[in-house]
Image (tube, helix red, strand yellow):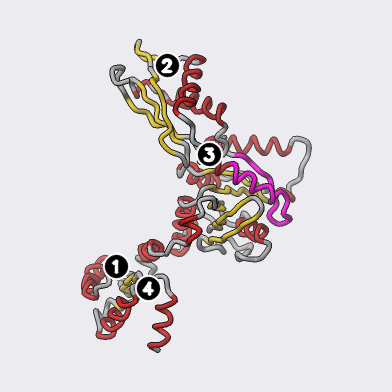
Amino acid sequence: MREQANLAITMADVILFVTDIRQGITATDREIAIMLKKSGKPIVLVCNKADNYEKDKEESYEFYNLGLGEPFPISATNALGIGDVLDKIYENFPKTMDEEDDESQIKVAIIGKPNVGKSSLVNKILGENRSIVSDIAGTTRDAIDTQFENDKGKYTLIDTAGIRRKSKVKESIEKFSIMRTMLAIERSDVCLMMIDATQGVTDQDAKIAGEAHEAGKGVVIVVNKWDIVEKETGTLEKYKKEIYDKLKYLSYAPIIFISAKTGQRVNKLFDLINYVAEQNSLRISTSVLNQVINEAIAMVQPPTDKGKRLKIFYGTQASTKPPTFIIFVNDKELFHFSYERYLVNQIRKEFGLQGTPVRIIVREKSEKEV
């Protein structure tokens, strides 16, 4: 038994040590703790059977005496405290060489509501049944990372659990799936927002797409199951208009119509992914940016309020992913949303920035400071 334990410890990247909070620290717990500390591996200490979570949480403090760091009280039966443990385990996962060294690799999160064809798309790309595919919504419970390389480049495909409406989220495990999907969006470079062509854009689609937009990620709208949609002249353009009407904040995102089942246009996805990732990382020199801003001001004068006119002194790019610009003005209150939108449109007109949000940060400066 000890040999099996030693082998498991040697092979592990992170060790999950589970104790019984009702029994307190036992002699066996102390022996195991000594053995684990010698391994030098990251250890997550879990105190199970904390069914009365708030009361038992205080009881867990005793386990600090094992010298293994913070104890996490949980109730496996009632699924309490599991999220904190998963986060701690994730924090201690070692970074792979690809993640550390290969900056050319694009992380692609495949997002959308359940049963829209996310796993089917991954399987079609890989040419094998890497992810479980089922007509039962919610089969994919967690984010699954797959390394993939083709003639277009290197990618990490992140197949995520679909996000249901909150009213339908009853199982604790489904709540964790939603959390993992949000984390997948956060660590991605580009999100493929999948929509079911037979259903159109739903409220749930809008919610999920909004998460990617707010996170500042590059977005490609992927309309799946296009092979089974009845078509006539103008169907595609009409469908695009309906999508942009319902997802106005994603008017910058390109749309592609595919069939994950047949492979229709799936190979064209990677050109879009590469382009959007490049746009999301685009950096514009200060001199060129200000030339565009000055031309925009000359075409449409900044607004006035009670006789006071907005003055835009200059702008500079603060960061990428997404492209973020700081605009220095005389009075932030005069910088109305409509004029901000106008400037963003002019910047997009000049530089493209397709598939990526553009953020504006407004700062005040006096004319003496300029």
- Mark-to-mark CA distance, 2 and 4: 60 Å
> Mark on residue 16?
4
Tell me how far mark 1 sits from mark 2, CA to CA: 56 Å
Question: Quick one: SS at disc 1?
Answer: helix
Q: Would you say 369 lies left or right of 240 here?
A: left
| Nearer the camera: disc 2 or disc 3 | 3
Q: Is residue 288 left or right of residue 312?
A: right
Q: Residue at x 50, y 62 (%)?
A: 142
State the quadrant of the N terminus: bottom left
* Residue on which the image places disc 1: 53
Label 2's element? loop
Residue numbers of the magenta segment: 254-275
The mark lying in front, picked from 1 and 2, is 2
Identify the secondary structure beneath mark 3.
loop
On the question of residue 199 being in view, the answer is no
Could you tell me residue 181's position as x and y percent? 49, 55
The outermost residue toward the top is 307
Of pointers 4 and 1, the one earlier in the residue sequence: 4
Q: Above or below — where is 17 with respect to 290?
A: below
**Disc 2 target residue:** 303
